[in-house]
Amino acid sequence: MLDPKLLRSHPEQIAEQLRRRGFELDVARLNRLEAERKQLQVQTQQLQSERNSSARAIGQAKAKGDDIAPLLQAVSDLKARLEAAEERLRELQEEIGEVVMGIPNIPHESVPDGTGEEENVELRRWGEPPRFDFEPRDHVDLGTALGQMDFEAAARMTGSRFTLLSGPLARLHRALIQFMLDLHTSEHGYTEVYVPYLVNSDSLRGTGQLPKFEQDLFRLSGEHDYYLIPTAEVPVTNMVRETIIEAADMPRRFVAHTPCFRSEAGSYGKDTRGMIRQHQFEKVEMVQVVRPQESWQALEQLTGHAETVLQKLDLPYRVVVLCTGDLGFSAAKTYDLEVWLPGQQNYREISSCSNFVDFQARRMKARWRDPETGRPELVHTINGSGLAVGRTLVAVMENYQKKDGSIQIPEVLREYMGGAELIPG
RNA sequence: GGAGGGUUGGCUGAGUGGUUGAAAGCACCGGUCUUGAAAACCGGCAUGGGUUUACGCCCAUCCAGGGUUCGAAUCCCUGACCCUCCGCCA
């Protein structure tokens, strides 16, 4: 959510900045609603003030033993007028609230202009795509040949876009999780957290998935109105919802491994083969809650933490900065890490690191006490995948494959694999 | 699943219809005292919104929503969450 004060005072400037990301802000409508709100609010508050003072007068008269009948007479129609005004004001504020909640974040000035994915800008590359003296296979062929990856069985027990892993491949998947968590907690200063995988709608509103992106979520039916988390960002960021953090406790850095559940109703036909796009996948997520003046530095740092995972796994990747048109709803700036997949001969997204500045914090009422002002101020929130586990498994399989279909185990994972160096073909 | 208790400011916690936005304590900030610190003493200290050049004034908020009333933290209803006991259970 954008600062309502800014939205009121400089709507044209905000509209212009939002136009960069292809969002058309209806300034005329907003101004009209605001003008009406202002007028109605003043009127309502006048009536409330009237009610308060007359109620007080009645109380005093009663205490003195005076006759209160004429006073009661004087306020006889006040209540009806007040209720009508309050009702209209409430409706109006709801309408304004809906409009405001549907406005995306303003892109940071450093974000390149563009209309979509193809205009994202590559910043740097790390590592060399491996050369094979044979035709490299993709993870589906490799996993199926090993007999340790079964999409058909998963489709029978559930449906499409699910995977069944078994044996060493299942263990490798788990090893990746352990490795990532250990790295971030022991070397990058994150606190590991375990969180609910079901959340309420307030939490999803707080991080920006609701109200606009309900179709991407799995929602429970039955007694509770809960949703399956689409990312650990939701529960972890909401840890600080409606709290005031003391300056000494900043910054806060959390890392969590969770499954993620995405309906992605709009993605039919995209990445239908393999584990790239699933309804359920594991992710290790880093979240930072920082002082506003530190958030841009924190984004660079957090992106580096995600890169370290790829470097330690010796997986070639590149870093791109998303252009304005590809930016997520809540983000002010996003770096994507894309890993090299020999099976696709392409770089594919494996991590997304974003600075949300105060956008989520305002929705969540997440604040800290600024020693400069002594008052509660909004925090900034940053998060990033460190990394998407399923896609990392894909990357390891495809980059570490051998001609006979066996898969070499990256050195840093061996301690989590009982010392094994190879998944034999 | 059954029975009961609770939810008040950063924290603890008073407060059952009329200057209560809310006692008191803690924490925090400033001052006096002190070589310095502590203690003691004095003072300050909620959030959001409207309005004003400004001092300020006004409104809302005591879990949420509805109701009763001239007037609700306080009474009634519904819901959420927390706690205790019983039952069941990984």
Image: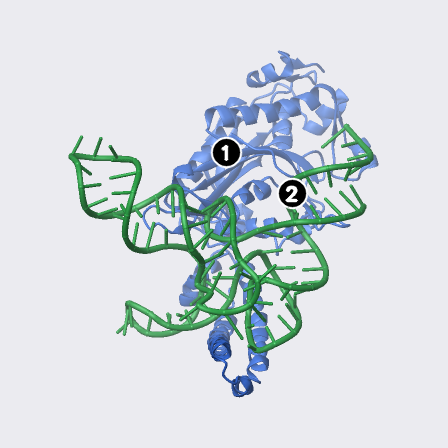
Chain colours: A blue, B green
Percent x, y for residue A6? 42, 62
The residue closer to the viewer here, A258 or A90, is A90
Residue placed under numbered mark 2 in the picture: A229
Give the x, y percent position of residue A32. Answer: 50, 75
Quarter holding the C terminus of chain A is: top right
Residue under mark 2: which chain is it in? A
The Cα atoms of the two marked residues, 1 and 2, are separated by 28 Å
Nearer to me, A404 or B81: B81
In the image, residue A41 lies at what x, y percent?
Answer: 49, 74
User: Could you tell me if residue A56 is visible in this image?
Assistant: yes
Q: Is residue A171 above or below residue A372?
A: above
Q: Could you say whether the residue bearing mark 1 is in a helix, strand or loop?
A: strand
**Where A298 falls versus A33 (above or below)?**
above
Whether residue A24 appears in this view of the structure is: no
Q: Chain of mark 1?
A: A
Q: Height in image: A345 above or below A68?
A: above
